[in-house]
Image (tube, helix red, strand yellow):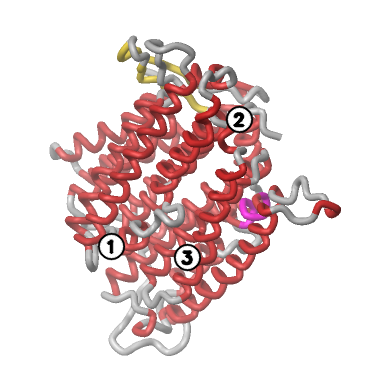
């Protein structure tokens, strides 16, 4: 069994033995720690194995069907390893934060982790899609069974939206397979085989329509405006580890799919003017419309949920730039956002458990008795708004610069650059709502009857882990970019 197969199947096996009765916490933490070591080793050794060619490493394939050609194939480059590293870091933090929870919490979190790792590390479209669907099932169930507030409505909404989005995505993926196949009857789902075929695809006139179908399918999974209304209620209602895993990790699958499948296989579709304009209008909806919606939130869980939807717009802006600098920034911001939103949802869950409320009007003055939580929440909040020195800032700067890479003063602003200028107001909006929330929760006069205490040293470990990652990547983003840009350069982007 190959290294990547072990990484994918280890959480699945741990979930099975946990469900069958093994000690849930010990089993889950042991599996997640081992996976962190394995993914970390693969990430650190990728460049030494493949130098500057950006090729897939650790490849292995097992044939499932010959016609059409489907195989359980795995492989990793800088992009997929970065997403795998995000997955194992958030998984470990989510599992560690579970204290006195039922066995189903550990099982569901491990299943989501296995599904996400399979989606990021498989190189066959069939299994890439199937693993993502596997991760969605425990997400739906956990929100419905153990969620907060109007959990049943949130569970139905996320099920319907993502169910429809997955069907649209499936149609788009089948379209790509058909589009790139030179002859009928010789269909292959192997991404590595489809890539060279895409250049000579016989159905070029369908490229724009096929790309747009993929954009809608993947975009629905990412909460791209206007297919976003499932996300905020679902994250606000979800149990803490599920919110961490879905908002921090699984939602990045849609962005990963666009970078891995849609952009390299359908480049003419991505460059079609009407497709570009549609994407720019939609991402502006994420940034500005959802930014103003977030400003009017009166609860912390609602604010974090809507903020997560808003920040997806910046990542789409990096993809819309159409150059390597923008894609590097998009991948870096995907990683940074995943870490920061997971940290904030973890702290949000702790506030809910201790205080019984997340309404800003009922909170205040918590920093007096919980200085550590105040500090760590500040790290997550400042990362979210793009404070220099933290990981999100580096990704956002690269994205904004990428949109002006080919700027010519004599030609004036393009629609892309006008979109970027408007998007900069989102930075101001996010700073306003996040700093205002921070002040209302931790400063001022404490509300009567609400007391918050700092966690124990062991409970601080996952908070330290995520905060340290934000700081390290923020101060030295090359630790990720040196690996990511090698792989993205292999796609031919400049």
Is residue 42 left or right of 102 when viewed as pictured? right
Q: Are dots 2 and 3 in contact, CB under 8 Å? A: no
Mark yes or no: residue 334 visible.
Answer: yes
In the displayed structure, 197 sits above or below 109; it is above
Mark yes or no: residue 40 visible.
Answer: no
- Point out residue 246 in the picture as x, y percentages from the top left corner: 36, 50
Going from N to C along the chain, the mark reached first, 1 or 3, is: 1
Going from N to C along the chain, the mark reached first, 1 or 2, is: 1
Is residue 70 left or right of 107 when viewed as pictured? right
Within-10-Å neighbours for mark 3: few <14, some 14–19, many 20+? many
- Identify the residue at horizontal 37%, vertical 84% (top origin): 361
- Identify the residue at horizontal 77%, vertical 45% (top origin): 406
To which residue does mark 2 refer?
Answer: 487
To which residue does mark 3 refer?
Answer: 290
SS class, disc 3: helix
Does residue 494 show up magenta in the picture?
no
Of badges 1 and 3, the one in the foreground is 3
Quote the CA–CA distance across marks 2 and 3.
32 Å
Quote the CA–CA distance across marks 1 and 3.
18 Å
Q: Main secondary structure of the magenta part?
A: helix
- Mark sitting on residue 237: 1
Query: Where does the N terminus fall, quadrant-wise?
Result: top left
Is residue 408 left or right of 454 when viewed as pictured? right
Which residues fall within the magenta stretch? 393-398
Does residue 394 show up magenta in the picture?
yes
In the displayed structure, 190 sits above or below 337; it is above
């Amino acid at each position: 069994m190959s290294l990547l197969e072990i990484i994918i199947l280890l959480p699945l096996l741990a979930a099975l033995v946990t469900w069958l009765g093994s000690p849930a916490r010990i089993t889950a933490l042991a599996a997640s720690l081992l996976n962190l070591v394995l993914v970390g080793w693969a990430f650190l050794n990728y460049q030494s194995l493949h130098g500057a060619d950006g090729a897939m490493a650790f490849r292995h394939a097992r044939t499932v069907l010959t016609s059409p050609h489907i195989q359980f194939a795995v492989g990793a480059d800088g992009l997929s390893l970065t997403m795998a590293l995000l997955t194992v870091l958030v998984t470990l933090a989510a599992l560690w934060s579970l204290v006195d929870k039922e066995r189903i919490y550990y099982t569901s979190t491990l299943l989501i982790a296995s599904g996400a790792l399979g989606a990021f590390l498989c190189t066959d479209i069939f299994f890439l899609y199937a693993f993502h669907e596997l991760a969605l099932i425990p997400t739906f169930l956990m929100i419905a069974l153990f969620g907060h507030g109007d959990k049943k409505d949130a569970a139905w909404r996320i099920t319907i939206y993502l169910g429809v989005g997955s069907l649209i995505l499936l149609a788009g993926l089948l379209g790509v397979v058909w589009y790139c196949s030179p002859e009928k009857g010789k269909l292959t789902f192997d991404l590595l085989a489809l890539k060279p075929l895409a250049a000579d695809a016989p159905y070029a006139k369908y490229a724009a329509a096929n790309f747009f179908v993929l954009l809608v399918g993947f975009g629905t999974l990412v909460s791209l405006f206007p297919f976003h209304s499932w996300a905020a209620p679902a994250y606000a209602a979800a149990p803490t580890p599920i919110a961490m895993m879905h908002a921090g990790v699984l939602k990045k699958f849609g962005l990963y799919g666009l970078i891995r499948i849609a952009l390299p296989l359908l480049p003419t579709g991505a460059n079609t003017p009407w497709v570009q304009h549609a994407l720019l209008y939609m991402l502006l909806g994420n940034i500005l419309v959802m930014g103003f919606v977030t400003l009017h939130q009166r609860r912390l869980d609602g604010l974090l949920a809507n903020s997560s939807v808003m920040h997806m717009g910046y990542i789409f802006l990096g993809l819309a730039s159409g150059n390597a600098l923008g894609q590097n920034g998009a991948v870096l911001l995907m990683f940074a956002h995943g870490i920061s939103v997971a940290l904030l949802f973890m702290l949000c869950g702790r506030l809910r458990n201790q205080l019984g409320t997340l309404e800003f009007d009922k909170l205040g003055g918590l920093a007096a008795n919980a200085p550590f939580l105040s500090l760590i929440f500040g790290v997550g909040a400042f990362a979210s708004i793009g404070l220099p020195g933290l990981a999100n800032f580096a990704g956002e700067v690269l994205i904004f610069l990428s949109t002006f890479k080919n700027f010519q003063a004599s030609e004036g602003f393009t629609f892309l650059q006008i979109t970027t200028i408007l998007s900069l107001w989102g930075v101001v909006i996010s700073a306003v709502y996040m700093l205002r929330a921070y002040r209302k929760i931790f400063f001022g006069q404490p509300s009567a009857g609400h007391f918050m205490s700092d966690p124990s040293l062991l409970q601080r470990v996952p908070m330290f882990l995520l905060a340290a990652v934000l700081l390290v990547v923020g101060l030295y983003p090359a630790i990720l970019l040196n690996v990511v840009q090698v792989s993205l350069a292999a796609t031919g982007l400049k």
